[in-house]
Image (cartoon, grey):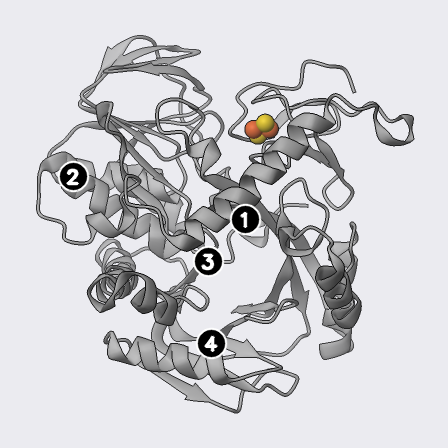
């Protein structure tokens, strides 16, 4: 089943690349980040062409819950302690500015996409101390935030952190209108990139600047993004008859849910886990994880939609499901996106990836940063997101965990398959794929590529279908 945005939006199709051509900038990927980047480049006088393997917005943009917010889980207290107040303040500023920039574009172009300003909340059912610290950190950085102990949620909370002046919208309607102002070639898969040449299955494009904005960079070298990023899946159900909420909510507890109103619907999300690892939140099912799953009723394997529906019935008896879908997010080692120069070895290449669960504000921030870098403008926020930034202690710890998953995935393809099922190996780097019963797909635990029952590619970084017959 597709997302609620897909069901109500039909974006006009575009022609594939007609053959060899030249353009000042090539943007790979026609999702929110790619279309915004191409738009701002054109505004700055740089001719840009977007190359899209499938259709506009057909990747992760169609699956977002479309919260436009600077509230990126518990981040500001941690940012201040890790990077200092100045960096944290810049992070807050560019994300707050992103909300305003969406509003400005929507008003200027008269885009009917249900843009609404509303508060965003973090909640916990078990403890309020971290939420209080987060609210204090946000206030110190200039965000309108407050800690409260009451909420409109259908259960009691230990506390909430409220950010005012945040927003939500219908992302595909926005993309539909903005993409009319940029040149997009659909059904054009990029196969290779070399210095100033992009090779596709429809022809080659000579260019000065290449922007990789197709979710997970498909090139392994240079950049090595496969070694410093993994992917997570999460699940959404759109409920009817669940009542109305004013704000958007995210739980910070291990079983935390996401609540987001849209018209007569309430989008209830959760069940996050590392792609290809069928356990809660991507954690190996050690003793602590198992007891947490038991305590909160989170399924260890599969049935995440079932679990979400149980939550929905418990909180909103009588509600019904109008749609359900899932999303896939790129997670970085230190929790900050990679936006900037792709690699020191490729001066004309740029990247925007690793947005975590915060694709809307980060896509806007990324588009503004990349446009500034390409046009040689000042951008004080660029350093924070630079893919070449130094390693933190958290990143080092995550690197070990990520490496362990990769080694396990690679080692597994040497072992006989469980239950006599023929499980294919991933064409990206050869890890053993795992069956995902929720989505009926084969998912890679190493870097998150996904394939349907027949082995057709769904999500990158792999670029090809599974060769082995399933
Ligand atoms: Fe890298 Fe599968 S996505 S090995």
The residue that disc 2 covers is 373
Q: Is mark 4 on a helix, strand or loop?
A: strand
How far is the residue under mark 1 from the one under mark 3? Answer: 8 Å
Evaluate if marks 4 and 2 touch, with contact meaning CB atoms under 8 Å apart.
no
Please tell me which of labels 4 and 3 falls first in the chain.
3
Q: Name the residue under label 1.
A: 63
As measured in the structure, the alpha-carbon distance from the residue carrying label 4 to the one carrying label 3 is 15 Å
Specify whether residue 150 is in view: yes
Callout 3: helix, strand or loop?
loop
Element at badge 2? helix
The residue identified by callout 4 is 121
Q: As rendered, which of 217 and 69 lies closer to the eye?
A: 217
Instruction: Report the residue at 61% width, 69% height from top.
Output: 256
Residue 49 located left or right of residue 238: left
Q: Residue furthest left?
A: 377
Name which of mark 3 and mark 2 comes first in the sequence. Answer: 3
Quadrant including the C terminus: top right
């Amino acid at each position: 089943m597709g997302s609620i945005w897909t069901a109500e939006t039909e974006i006009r199709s575009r022609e594939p690349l007609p053959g060899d051509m030249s353009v000042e900038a090539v943007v790979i990927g026609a999702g929110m980040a790619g279309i915004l980047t191409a738009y701002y480049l054109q505004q700055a006088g740089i001719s840009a062409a977007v190359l899209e393997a499938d259709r506009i917005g057909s990747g992760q943009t169609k699956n977002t819950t479309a919260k436009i917010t600077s509230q990126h889980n518990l981040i500001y207290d941690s940012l201040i302690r890790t990077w200092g107040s100045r960096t944290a303040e810049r992070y807050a500023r560019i994300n707050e500015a992103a909300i305003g920039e969406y509003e400005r574009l929507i008003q200027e172009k008269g885009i009917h996409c249900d843009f609404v300003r509303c508060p965003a909340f973090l909640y916990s059912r078990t403890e309020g101390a971290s939420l209080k610290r987060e609210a204090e950190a946000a206030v110190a950085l200039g965000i309108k935030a407050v800690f409260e102990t009451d909420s409109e949620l259908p259960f009691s909370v230990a506390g909430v952190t409220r950010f005012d002046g945040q927003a939500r919208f219908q992302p595909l309607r926005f993309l539909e209108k903005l993409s009319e102002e940029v040149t997009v070639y659909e059904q054009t898969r990029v196969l290779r990139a070399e210095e100033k040449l992009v090779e596709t299955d429809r022809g080659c494009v000579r260019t000065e600047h290449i922007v990789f904005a197709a979710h997970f960079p498909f090139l392994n070298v240079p950049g090595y993004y496969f070694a410093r990023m993994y992917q997570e899946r999460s699940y959404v159900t759109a409920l009817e008859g669940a009542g109305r909420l004013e704000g958007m909510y995210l739980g910070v507890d291990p079983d935390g849910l996401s609540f987001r109103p849209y018209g007569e619907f309430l989008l209830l999300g959760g069940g996050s886990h590392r792609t290809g690892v069928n356990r809660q939140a991507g954690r190996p099912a050690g003793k602590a994880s198992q007891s947490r799953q038991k305590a909160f009723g989170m399924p260890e394997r599969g049935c995440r939609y079932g679990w979400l529906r149980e939550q929905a019935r418990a909180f909103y008896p009588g509600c019904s499901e109008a749609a359900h879908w899932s999303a896939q997010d790129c997670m970085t080692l230190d929790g900050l996106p990679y936006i900037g120069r792709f690699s020191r070895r490729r001066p004309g290449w740029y990247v925007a990836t690793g947005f975590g669960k915060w694709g809307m504000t980060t896509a806007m921030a990324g588009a503004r940063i990349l446009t500034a870098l390409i046009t040689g403008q000042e951008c004080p926020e660029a350093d924070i997101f630079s893919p070449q930034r130094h390693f933190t202690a958290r990143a080092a710890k995550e690197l070990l965990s990520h490496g362990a998953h990769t080694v396990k995935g690679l080692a597994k393809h040497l072992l006989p398959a469980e239950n006599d099922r023929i499980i294919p190996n991933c064409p990206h780097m050869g890890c053993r794929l795992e069956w995902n019963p929720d989505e009926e797909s084969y998912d890679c635990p190493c870097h998150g590529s996904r394939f349907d029952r027949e082995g057709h590619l769904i999500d990158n970084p792999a670029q090809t279908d599974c060769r082995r017959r399933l």
